[in-house]
Amino acid sequence: MMTVEKLEALRKQWKAELDDKHSKETQIIVGMGTCGIAAGARGVMAAILAEVDNRQLKNISVLQTGCIGMCAREVLVDVVRPGEDRITYGSVKPSDVKRIIGEHVVNGNIVEDLVVAKIAKEELA
Amino acid sequence: MHHIKAQVIVFGGTDFGTTAKDIQERFVQELTKKGLKDTVKVMETGGHGYVENGPMVIVYPDGTFYSNVKPEDVAEIVESHICNGQVVDRLLFHDKMTQEQIPEYKEMPFFKKQVRIVLENVGKINPEKIEEYVASGGYEGLAKALTTMQPQEVVDEIKKSGLRGRGGAGFRTGMKWQFARDAKGDKKYIICNADEGDPGAFMDRSVLEGDPHRVLEGMIICAYAIGADEGYIYVRAEYPLAIKRLRNAIAQDEELGFLGDNILGSGFNFRLHIKEGAGAFVCGEETALMASIEGRRGMPRPRPPFPANSGLWGKPTNNNNVETYANIAKIIVKGADWFSSIGTKGSSGTKVFALTGKINNTGLAEVPMGITMREVIFEIGGGIANGRKFKAVQIGGPSGGCLPESLLDLPIDYDALTQVGAMMGSGGLVVMDDSTCMVDVAKFFLNFTQSESCGQCTPCREGTKRMLEILTRITDGQGSESDIALLETLAKNIKLSALCGLGQTAPNPVLSTLHYFRDEYEAHIKDKKCPAGVCENLADFYITDACKGCGLCARNCPVHAISGKPKEQHVIDTTICIKCGTCMSNCPFNAIKKG
């Protein structure tokens, strides 16, 4: 049975696990609300998975989230490298994926023409 | 021997001719003037390879890298940087964009004025993983309510917070809960109304898709407070992703024991079901919604009895909207005082708006109550798209109204909006520019309510149909001067006599456009003109001075309504013109306009 103590223990454990993942893995997060999907998020997601597979990249998780509200800028893709800020790219097309992965995920350089905003690493914790 | 405090390296070589040499000499001169000649060392070195960045200077010990430096910049570097420790920003070398240069979300105009309670996690966490919700503080409110508060204390806290229903009318949530709690009966239900149906509204969908556990947590707390052991989420079938994520979230809650028997060891049991709605707008009305859950045709019934006493299957029932439930857990965790400190006196907290229409930043924004419409549209929304002019904003869906520019500085809260003939509604904001015909907009909304009317009561079924006929007549150019008065009479009667909220508010779009844009109605009726050029039958084609006199239009006109000499501006005879548009599509100079 779930108890308050167990919930608090789980909260700590899950938070530690997420922090640990964040410190070791690069996360690629695609906005998969209805607005994102309508703007083509599924194609972008498929292109990301294919590119990660193609390059045999390790320590990458490809994840999904809901709609942050900037529907006009969908498809939104966030990249968080270990210990870095969470960078959001907007109006991403499947053809942009190779650049985002090649330049940012692998080499750590921002893809300037697609970048929208960031969430500072201090706020990610 | 002097102690060297700083070092200046000038990259010269032959790439920049004598400039580098000049820069070095200027440094020596300026440092001598400041009496720093012996403590700051100036060196010149060979080219750096970055020819396109002009002569470059590095100042140590901090290693600041200046590019495109000119001799006349030297005095500033010495004064500001070496003497006062202030880096000269304008000369800083910029390589590739660094993460520091990217704006943070909270600094962007779109997010700056937002206060996110309901949308706190949306777009940040993975909605299909309960781990992420819990790690970000999820189910803390539930734990607090179930183990440290009596049900009545939970109701009191919600009352004290001043939270009002986010679905439209703005009834006080705490009071509603009290009625259901006080109702006699051993079986009680709670319902989450996720039958979001206003044109242009998608707030609830985003919350359900992006953070479903927040809604579930609010519902479980509510059930505990009023003593319900069963709940329904009524969500439209057109939201398949929201349904999928809700089902997933419910399954996770059942597995972990946030739903089921003896939740968190409190002895409280609660089960949740999903009911998929078939998409009838009227089912958003609570009595129709309950009929639909019971398997009957979705039609409203008169109240009393109110659902709090006799609701679903005749049992005491509490209905709240998605966004209302999504506020609950945070109020329990942070307290009623925290919540009521946000927003205005009569309307505490925040409201989520869906920004649509002719606006630059289409999207979702959660703002504190009391913010002005101008801030929402022009700061958060980024203003009107395509550089056009603002004309009106429609708020509150088919039950709401259109507000003109003069009301843009009105603070948004429940009471202020009602006073000006609109209503908060569920939060759809449709922004319209100067190419919009307000009579046409009223017709659009009336067409919507008329086709969504359940047909049960005459004022709504027949009344909205008659109003729509009059509006159609006006936009067709057949309106008569008595039509405005007739519209107003019908509107008043329908408001007073319709059975449910849908019918009672159906005339609002007509009344508010009549109130704020009466001149447009009059132009349609008296001058037979549509000022915005939208209404087909009232728009004339005309040729502008962009015409080169090629004669293509005249040759293609099926009724020979166009005349003119070669190489001179042509003219359309509007008494002959049949408005087929052939001339417009044939003109190579875009010289033919409609209006």
Image (cartoon, coloured by chain):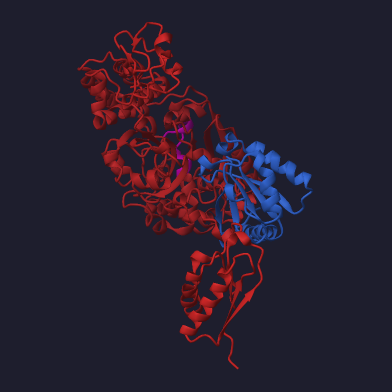
Which chain is depicted blue? A
Nearer to us in this view, B129 or B379? B379
Nearer to us in this view, B293 or B224? B293
Which chain is depicted red? B
Q: Check the image and report above or below for A104 versus B166.
A: below
Identify which residue is drawn at 21% across, 18% down.
Answer: B526
The magenta stretch is B310-324
- Residue projecting furthest to the top: B559
Where is residue B31 drawn, in percent x and y? 50, 82
Nearer to us in this view, B436 or B283? B436
Query: In screen coordinates, is B308 left or right of B146?
Result: left
Q: Quadrant of residue A6?
A: bottom right
Taking the image as drawn, is residue B269 in sight?
no
Q: Check the image and report above or below for B409 versus B301.
A: below
- Residue projecting furthest to the bottom: B1
Where is residue B33 drawn, in percent x and y? 46, 83
Nearer to us in this view, A35 or A55? A55
Taking the image as drawn, is residue B517 in sight?
yes
Where is residue B191 drawn, in percent x and y? 49, 38
